[in-house]
Image: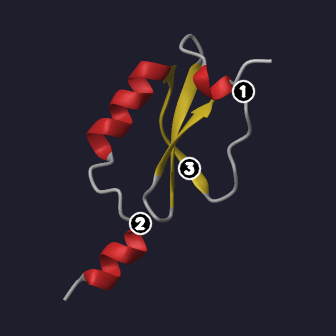
Amino acid sequence: MTNPFENPEGRYFVLINQEEQYSLWPEFTDIPRGWSVVFGQDHKQKCLDYISENWTDMRPKSHVVAMRP
């Protein structure tokens, strides 16, 4: 069996959690609790492009908030 996260021909969603972290998620799999769809369903590369354009700060949201003066 092949890894569904590595299928270049697959259809995916981009998910985000409360910490504003992103995940690529196969369209045929249930969305995990605590995550929301922000993009897709689309081809893998389109989803990866969306993540690259929008996830510009890899720090969890709680860390960013804690570091504010």
Q: Earlier in the sequence, mark 1 or mark 3?
A: 1
Name the foreground residue: 20 vs 67.
67
Image mark for residue 39: none
Amino acid type for the residue under numbered disc 3: Ser
Contact flag, marks 2 and 3 (Cβ < 8 Å): no
Badge 1 density bin: few <14, some 14–19, many ≥20, Cα 10 Å: few
Q: CA distance from mark 1 to mark 2?
A: 27 Å
Instruction: Name the residue at 68% across, 24% down.
Output: 4
Instruction: Name the residue at 72% across, 27% down.
Output: 28
Circle 3 sits in a helix, a strand or a loop, which is it? strand
Q: Quadrant of residue 49?
A: top left
Q: Position of residue 16 (x, y in %)?
A: 49, 51
Q: Quadrant of the C terminus?
A: bottom left
Identify residue for label 2: 60
Seen in the picture, residue 32 relative to 3 is either above or below; the reply is below
Image mark for residue 28: 1
Q: Quadrant of residue 34?
A: bottom right
Q: Quadrant of the N terminus?
A: top right
Amino acid type for the residue under numbered disc 1: Phe
Does 20 sit left or right of 64 as displayed?
right
Amino acid type for the residue under numbered disc 2: Pro
Q: What color scheme is it? A: secondary structure
Seen in the picture, residue 52 relative to 45 is either above or below; the reply is below
Identify residue for label 3: 36
Badge 2 density bin: few <14, some 14–19, many ≥20, Cα 10 Å: few
Q: Earlier in the sequence, mark 1 or mark 2?
A: 1
Q: CA distance from mark 1 to mark 3?
A: 15 Å
Does 33 sit left or right of 21 as displayed?
right
